Image (tube, rainbow, N blue to C red):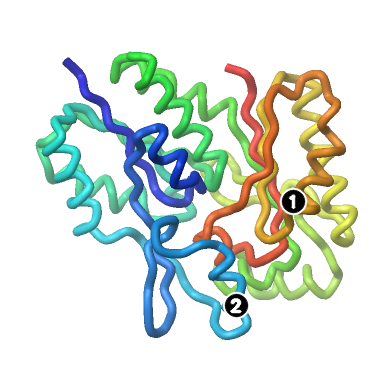
Amino acid sequence: MQKIAIITDSSCDLTIDEIKEYNLNILPLKIIYKDREYNDIFDIKPIDVYENLHNEVPTTSLCSPDYINSVLDKLEAEGYTHLIGIFISSSLSGTFNAARLVIEERNSFKYYLFDSKIIGYPLGSIVIKAAKLVKEGKSFEEIVEALPSIREATTGYYTLNTLEYLRRGGRIGKVAGTVGDLLHLKPIISVDEHGAYTTVSKARGRKQSLKKLASIILEHLDEYKCNVALLNGMAEEEANQVLDSISSHPNLLKSQVRDIGAAMGVHAGPGMVGVSIQKEI
């Protein structure tokens, strides 16, 4: 009989309650300061990062091989036979490859590792879909087969209040970030087919960028029935404004406003507003 474990990383931006509800196993990214470090989700909250940004901008790092092995040891002891790993885009983080190297060294499970080519709650929504399939009693093979279509139905967009933190983290070029801030350009960022950041639109100023984000959501809703989650980093009021502007669309199935996690907060900085869109499957 198959006993299937779902494993992901903390960039999925799921809450502790969701992790418990769906019996998920999390590989936490590390939030690193000069004199201390924390495990994302478990040891630090986004507000802790934001409140300390004026003193120090931390860096992020991969989950250690020892930690990954400890998670696998626990799963093996609990009698799991199959493992499905769903991870942050390998174009944005080394987490997928780090997990792969550790898991491949063991003969503990039949496993499948999925590079989501996405980040944040869009990743989390894919993970939840997979976990629901486990709860429904679907087989390992059925879940593996379903993952590409779940990913195909899922996308995300983000607009930042400043490009400073992406620039500091090396996610965009120094010149591009500086020029963008000087011109008050607010890009709408998504990921391309390789899972790398790409700019899908630009707006002049904060107000216009939020309007553009809403219009992108409406374009999706005009085509499909969708679940929509507005995402924010210390910008809940603006996220709610965007949600209000699309809330009457007949194709909107479920909607919510969520906080981004600490690791994403390091790179996005305060003021990020984004959206996770998942078509009805």
Residue 26: x, y in percent?
A: 35, 47
Residue 16 x %, y %: 44, 46
Q: Which of 266/193 is in front?
A: 266
Q: Where 172 falls versus 1 (above or below)? A: below
Q: Name which quarter of the figure residue 204 lies in.
A: bottom right
Camera-nearest residue between 203 and 175: 203
Count every numbered label the image shows and give the total: 2
- Quick one: quadrant of the N terminus? top left
The residue shown at (89%, 56%) is: 207
Query: Foreground mark, 2 or 1?
Result: 2
176 to 239, vertically: above or below: below
User: Which residue type does callout 2 highlight?
Assistant: Leu
Q: Is residue 35 left or right of residue 214?
A: left
Please identify the quarter of the rendering in which residue 165 is found. Answer: bottom right
Among the two numbered marks 2 and 1 on one chain, the one whose residue lies closer to the N terminus: 2
Position in image of residue 74 (x %, y %): 17, 43
**In terms of secondary structure, where does tag 1 sit?**
strand
* Vertical order, 236 against 140 (above or below): below
Residue placed under numbered mark 2 in the picture? 53
Residue at left offset 80%, top offset 53% = 238
Residue located 83% across and 53% down the image: 209
Q: SS of the residue at dot 2?
A: loop
Instruction: Specify the quadrant of the image occupied by residue 256.
Output: top right
Q: Which residue is mark 1?
A: 188
Mark 1, Cα crowd under 10 Å, few <14 / some 14-19 / many 20+, is many
Kind of residue at disc 1: Ile
Q: Quadrant of the C terminus?
A: top right
Other-residue count near label 2 (Cα within 10 Å), few / some / many at <14 / 14–19 / ≥20: some
Question: Residue at position x 19%, y 44% from top?
Answer: 72
Q: Is residue 117 left or right of residue 269?
A: left
Nearer to the camera, 49 or 149: 49
183 displayed left or right of 87: right
